[in-house]
Structure formats: structure tokens, C-alpha cells
Amino acid sequence: MRGYGPSFGIGFVAGMRSMSACAALTWAASLGRTRDDFIPGGPGARALSTVTAVAEMVGDKMSFAPDRRIPPSFAFRLAVGALGGWALASRRASPEYGALAGVAGSVAGTLLGRHARGGDSRTAAGRSRGLAEDAVAASLAVLVVMAAEPRRRSRPI
């Protein structure tokens, strides 16, 4: 199971806050910590994904925010977890198993995050738990990016 910690971790973040995982992936790409170059890591991608992550955190506290377990939301979280798991699997690890670890992390993050959060975001206690979940998701995203293995740079001959 070595080499799949960041894969599971990014999936867990996706389960809690899907756009935070997307933002973390763009930052990881900009730092050369993704498996390939298919994830954009330029300043525009980082800015856009970070703004959408903050917007998701704000919108999550609104009374009309949908449950994260509804099929479209859950499917998106699984897809982000799979993509992120693939991208953050170490060089010695299978990217396909990394994707599976990302999906497993997404399921765990979605269900455990929802259970810890509770169902009512309209109360002060519900909003407080939501803010705590935001802090955990953002902190975990930073830890996952820093734990991801840097890509090897080719040396000129």
C-alpha cells in the first residue's frame, strides 16, 4: 500500500469538499507533484480553482445547499477522487490502484464528513461544524500536496 497515501488523502478531501480537492490538484501540478502534465498548474488555473473552492465553502453553509450524497454530487466526488488518486500515486505505485485509492477516499470522506457534520446547516451549531469541516479539508489538502512525491526532472545531457 506504499505510495497510495496521497491518493487516498486527495479522495478524502474530495469527499468533504470537491472543489478544494480540485484546487489542491492544480497547486500540486504547479509544484511538480503530479504524475503527469494533464492537470493544469498555471496561475489562472490555480486562481480559478481556489476561488471556486472558497465559493463552495461559502455555498455549503446556505440552507439550499444540496446533500453531498445525492447521485450527481456523489458521482462528481468519486470522479475527482479517482483523477486525483491517479495523479498523486507515487512513481513506484500503480496509477490505476491510485485511482481506486482515490475513490475509496472519496467514499470515506463523503460519508464520514456528512456524519460528522450532521444534517442541519441552518443552525449556528451546524454552521460551526461546517466551518470546522472547511478547516479540516483545507488543512488535509495542504498536507496531501506536500506529501505527494515530486516528479523526476530530466537532466540535460
Image (cartoon, rainbow, N blue to C red):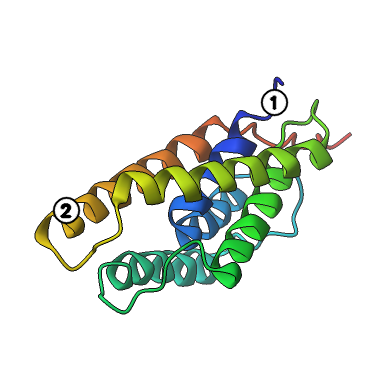
Q: Position of residue 10 (x, y in %)?
A: 56, 44
Numbered disc total? 2
Q: Is residue 34 visible?
A: no
Other-residue count near label 2 (Cα within 10 Å), few / some / many at <14 / 14–19 / ≥20: some
Q: In this view, does 59 lie above or below 137?
A: below
> Residue 102, located in which quarter of the rendered image?
top right
Q: Name the residue: 24% across, 47% down.
A: 132
Label 2's element? helix
Amino acid tagged 2: Ser
**Quarter of the rendering occupied by the N terminus:** top right
Q: Name the residue: 41% across, 73% down.
A: 66
Q: In this view, does 6 lie above or below 71?
A: above
The circle on residue 82 is: none
Other-residue count near label 1 (Cα within 10 Å), few / some / many at <14 / 14–19 / ≥20: many
Which one is nearer the viewer's eye here, 146 or 69? 69
Which one is nearer the viewer's eye here, 43 or 56? 56
> Is residue 54 found left or right of 143 in the rendered image?
left
Q: Is residue 39 above or below residue 149?
A: below
Which one is nearer the viewer's eye here, 72 or 90? 72
Q: Name the residue: 13% across, 63% down.
A: 123
Nearer the camera: disc 2 or disc 1 = 2
Q: Name the residue: 30% across, 59% down.
A: 119
Label 1's element? loop
**Which residue in the protein does label 2 denote?**
128
* Extreme residue in the right direction: 157
Q: Where is residue 32 in the image (x, y as percent from the top left)?
A: 64, 44
Amino acid tagged 1: Gly
* Extreme residue in the top direction: 2
* Extreme residue in the left direction: 124
**Which residue in the protein does label 1 denote?**
3
Q: Is residue 147 above or below residue 119?
A: above
